[in-house]
Image (tube, helix red, strand yellow):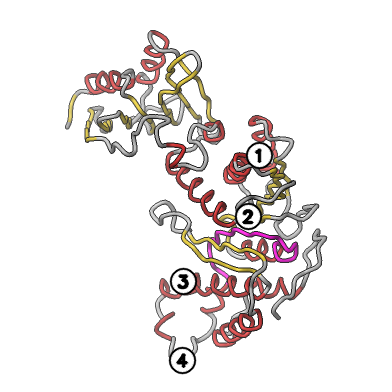
């Protein structure tokens, strides 16, 4: 309902200072005005000194966290945020969810609904059972993780847990994340493996030097610098020594996924997790030639051809990995409402009884569609620069 902004902010203030508060987020901007911070998130936290109000603000690059004592300090901090010209407030309590939107005319649109009690369970109640990595872990504060990002992290960690053996191997577990980007999943994998009792030694690889510097600084801030390091380089050329046991390649674009899989095979990595992204290579090859009979209608429309190219590309990747001696599962690792790029190739080396059959199936597919996947070319070429293990048998 519409009401004056002053009255609506007074309602929001009461909720932010209420013992029933579970979470609140302020974002956006009012017409013609810009807040001093891009986003603010508030929630209660339990410290040794008692319950405090944690406020995390970000300017769009790095988060700033402070824990404010109850009473006048919390009231002053809340009043300071309410004075900012945010365009939206989202406040969750144990019994309701309130959303405030400021209209172009400066009025307030306030919407209140009954809270989802499963989502607002008290801290420490069932959270350890719901998440593999505690949502209160300092990592999430450092990376400014939203609830959606925490869900994505948890889905990835569940896929990782399903891939690795139980119990985990003793001794150093060497992990490389190829195309790590901002490395939040790199750090999450390290934290999970430590909690699971492993001894991870993690290397993140990204072509951008600025990402290496940023991620290295964040590793030092989190206290991980001794075990989590970063190098700048391309996936196919970066030097990683000794070779890893576990290879991650999450949303490496187009043939960068093939580069990562080829290095994993050349390293004879024991486990591989790859989330492909942007399948342009095979799609371009399909556009250049007629489809085999009777599959013309399958690729007659552009959107159908693109989707079929996605399926064909990852089918060929999985078949090549099986021919190279890996057991491969192709799974959806997070719901498509979070990202359409939600396919995961989960591979474990060994236990593949019929490699010739996989090679024949692969040969028939590429012959019928007259395509040459980049992964095939890379495996046929053998070891990539920087590899120290002999290459596995490749399909040519």
User: Marks 4 and 3, Cα distance to the nearest angstrom?
Assistant: 18 Å
Of residues 314 and 22, which is closer to you in this image? 22
Please name the residue that numbered disc 1 is placed on: 215
Q: Residues within 10 Å of mark 3 (few under 14, many from 20)?
A: many
- Helix or strand or loop: what does disc 2 sit on? strand
Image quarter where the N terminus lies is top left
Q: Is residue 70 above or below residue 319?
A: above
Frontmost of labels 4 and 2 is 2
The answer to whether the residues at label 4 and label 3 have Cβ atoms under 8 Å apart is no
The circle on residue 313 is none
- Can the viewer see residue 376? yes
Q: Earlier in the sequence, mark 4 or mark 2?
A: 2
Image quadrant containing the C terminus = bottom right
- Tags 1 and 2 touching, CB below 8 Å: no
Instruction: Determine the secondary structure under disc 4.
Output: loop
Q: Separation of disc 1 and disc 2 at Cα?
A: 16 Å
Q: Are marks 2 and 3 in contact (CB under 8 Å)?
A: no
Q: Residues within 10 Å of mark 1 (few under 14, many from 20)?
A: many
Q: Is residue 219 left or right of residue 384?
A: left
Q: Depth-wise, is mark 2 or mark 3 nearer the camera? A: 2
Who's the residue at 65% across and 72% down the image? 374
Q: In this picture, which residue range is highlighted in magenta?
A: 264-281
Find residue 293 and name its label. Answer: 4
Residue farthest front in this picture: 167
Q: Which residue is mark 2?
A: 248
Is residue 207 covered in magenta?
no
Q: CA distance from mark 2 to mark 3?
A: 25 Å
- Tell me the element at label 3: helix
């Amino acid at each position: 309902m519409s009401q004056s902004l002053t009255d609506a902010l007074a309602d929001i203030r009461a909720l932010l200072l209420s013992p029933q508060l579970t979470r609140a987020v302020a974002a956006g901007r009012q017409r013609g005005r810009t807040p001093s911070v891009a986003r603010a998130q508030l929630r209660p936290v339990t410290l040794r000194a008692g319950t405090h109000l944690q406020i995390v603000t970000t300017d769009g690059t790095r988060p700033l966290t402070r824990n404010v004592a109850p009473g006048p300090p919390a009231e002053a901090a809340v009043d300071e945020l309410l004075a900012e010209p945010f365009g939206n407030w989202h406040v969750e309590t144990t019994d309701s969810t309130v959303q405030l939107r400021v209209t172009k005319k400066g009025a307030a649109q306030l919407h209140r609904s009954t809270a989802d009690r499963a989502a607002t369970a008290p801290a420490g109640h069932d959270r350890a059972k719901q998440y593999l990595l505690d949502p209160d872990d300092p990592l999430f504060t450092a990376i400014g993780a939203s609830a959606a990002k925490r869900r994505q992290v948890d889905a990835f960690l569940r896929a990782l847990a399903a891939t690795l053996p139980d119990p985990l191997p003793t001794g150093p577990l060497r992990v490389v994340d190829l195309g790590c980007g901002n490395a939040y999943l790199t750090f999450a994998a390290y934290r999970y493996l430590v909690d699971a009792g492993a001894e991870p030694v993690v290397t993140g690889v990204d072509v951008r030097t600025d990402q290496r510097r940023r991620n290295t600084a964040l590793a030092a801030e989190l206290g991980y610098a001794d075990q989590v390091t970063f190098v700048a380089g391309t996936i196919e050329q970066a030097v990683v020594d000794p070779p890893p046991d576990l290879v991650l390649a999450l949303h490496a674009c187009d043939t960068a996924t093939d580069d990562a899989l080829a290095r994993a095979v050349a390293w004879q990595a024991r486990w591989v997790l790859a989330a492909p992204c942007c399948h342009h290579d095979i799609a371009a090859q399909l556009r250049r030639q007629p489809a085999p009979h009777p599959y013309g209608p399958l690729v007659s429309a552009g959107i159908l051809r693109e989707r079929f190219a996605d399926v064909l590309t990852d089918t060929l990747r999985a078949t090549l990995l099986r021919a190279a001696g890996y057991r491969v599962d192709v799974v959806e690792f997070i719901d498509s409402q979070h990202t359409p790029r939600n396919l995961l190739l989960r591979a474990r080396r060994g236990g593949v009884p019929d490699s010739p059959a996989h090679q024949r199936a692969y040969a028939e597919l590429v012959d019928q569609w007259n395509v040459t996947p980049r992964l095939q070319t890379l495996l046929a070429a053998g070891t990539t620069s920087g590899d120290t293990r002999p290459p596995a048998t490749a399909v040519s």
